[in-house]
Image: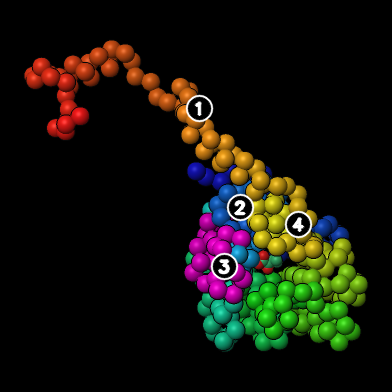
């Protein structure tokens, strides 16, 4: 199986900058495997993120925290094989970049070398600003992520919107500006008030991709399983469902099981034929020399 040929030129960092300048909204989705990557490619999105949200949506962990670098590298490699046009961003999981700049660079390099990603994403301001600067300095494009950063949800008081007081809003803005100054090519704003986004946007020279951050950003991102209705877990208020794929999958599998149990499947068109004279010859070969039907050495 190969990726379908595409006519679109690959999305570059320059192209994303142009889109921001022209006011053309940037569409980003997550993907975690070969088929979801193919869907993202054919749907014509600009950026695909192999999000650590895959910890929950495809690996079944209770949060994004336990997912390992190796697990995300495996998912990212599968996504790479399924698409070539959107910019591919690998999400650095919790524990893969916090310890030192050296650790952050070495693990970011794995996303590029082993999984074929174009860029990496990391969460938070604070010490992540220095990590982002170091990774950018090593020649790897970095996407920042501020506001609700699920890897530090416990410290943030749970999965809740951020920046809702003036002081907390200033903190979010400070993080965003720090990541921009560190050389990030783009940044995700997650779950912050639309009014705060409007205050920060005039200060952002890099593309800002929002998720629950209102309409003022340069683009929007949603989790693949959320927007298609594949994931059965709790959906945040910013999720808009564009399909109910899970219900359709259950309907299909139920129909198959029912057909098997009632022997409606398989039907003749699902099988392979054999010429009647070949069947006759088979019987002949089986009984040759013995005068008895061939049993293959077993008692039938
Ligand atoms: O992991 C993820 O899916 C993300 C997006 C929500 C931006 O970080």
Q: Is residue 95 left or right of residue 87?
A: left
Describe the element under mark 2 as helix, strand or loop: helix
Q: Position of residue 231 (x, y in %)?
A: 65, 56
Q: Quadrant of the C terminus?
A: top left
**Badge 1: residue crowd in 10 Å (few <14, some 14–19, many ≥20):** few
Label 1 vs 3, first from the N-terminus: 3
Q: CA distance from mark 2 to mark 4?
A: 14 Å
Q: CA distance from mark 4 to mark 1?
A: 43 Å
Front residue (pair 295, 12): 295
- Which callout, 1 or 3, points to the residue nearer the camera? 1
The residue sitting at 65% across, 71% down in the picture is 121
Describe the element under mark 1 as helix, strand or loop: loop
The residue sitting at 83% across, 84% down in the picture is 168
- Which callout, 3 or 2, points to the residue nearer the camera? 3
Front residue (pair 4, 288): 288
Label 4 vs 1, first from the N-terminus: 4
In this view of the protein, can residue 244 be seen by the observer? yes
For mark 1, what is the residue?
264
Label 4 vs 3, first from the N-terminus: 4
For mark 2, what is the residue?
37
Q: CA distance from mark 2 to mark 1?
A: 34 Å
The residue sitting at 73% across, 81% down in the picture is 157
Q: Quadrant of residue 60?
A: bottom right
């Amino acid at each position: 199986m190969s990726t379908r040929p595409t006519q679109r030129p690959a999305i570059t960092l320059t192209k994303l900058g142009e889109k921001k300048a022209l006011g053309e909204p940037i569409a980003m989705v997550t993907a975690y495997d070969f088929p979801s990557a193919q869907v993202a490619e054919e749907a014509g999105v600009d950026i695909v993120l192999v999000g650590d949200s895959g910890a929950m949506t495809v690996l079944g962990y209770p949060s994004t925290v336990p997912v390992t670098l190796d697990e995300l590298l495996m998912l990212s490699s599968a996504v790479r094989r399924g698409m070539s046009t959107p910019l591919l961003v690998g999400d650095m999981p919790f524990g893969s970049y916090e310890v030192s700049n050296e650790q952050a660079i070495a693990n970011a390099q794995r996303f590029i070398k082993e999984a074929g990603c174009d860029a990496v994403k990391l969460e938070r301001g604070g010490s992540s600003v220095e990590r982002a600067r170091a990774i950018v300095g090593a020649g790897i494009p970095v996407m920042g992520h501020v506001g609700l950063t699920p890897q530090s949800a416990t410290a943030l008081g749970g999965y809740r919107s951020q920046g809702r007081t003036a002081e907390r809003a200033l903190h979010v803005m400070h993080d965003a500006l720090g990541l921009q100054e560190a050389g990030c090519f783009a940044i995700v704003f997650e779950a912050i008030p639309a009014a705060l986004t409007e205050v920060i946007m005039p200060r952002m020279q890099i593309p800002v991709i929002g998720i629950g951050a209102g309409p003022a950003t340069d683009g929007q991102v949603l989790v693949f399983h959320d927007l298609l209705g594949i994931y059965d877990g709790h959906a945040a208020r910013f999720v808009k469902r564009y399909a109910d794929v899970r219900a359709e999958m259950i309907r299909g599998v139920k129909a198959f099981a029912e057909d098997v149990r009632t022997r409606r499947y398989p039907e003749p068109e699902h099988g392979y034929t054999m010429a009647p004279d070949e069947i006759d010859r088979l019987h002949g070969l089986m009984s040759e020399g013995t005068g008895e039907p061939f049993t293959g050495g077993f008692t039938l």
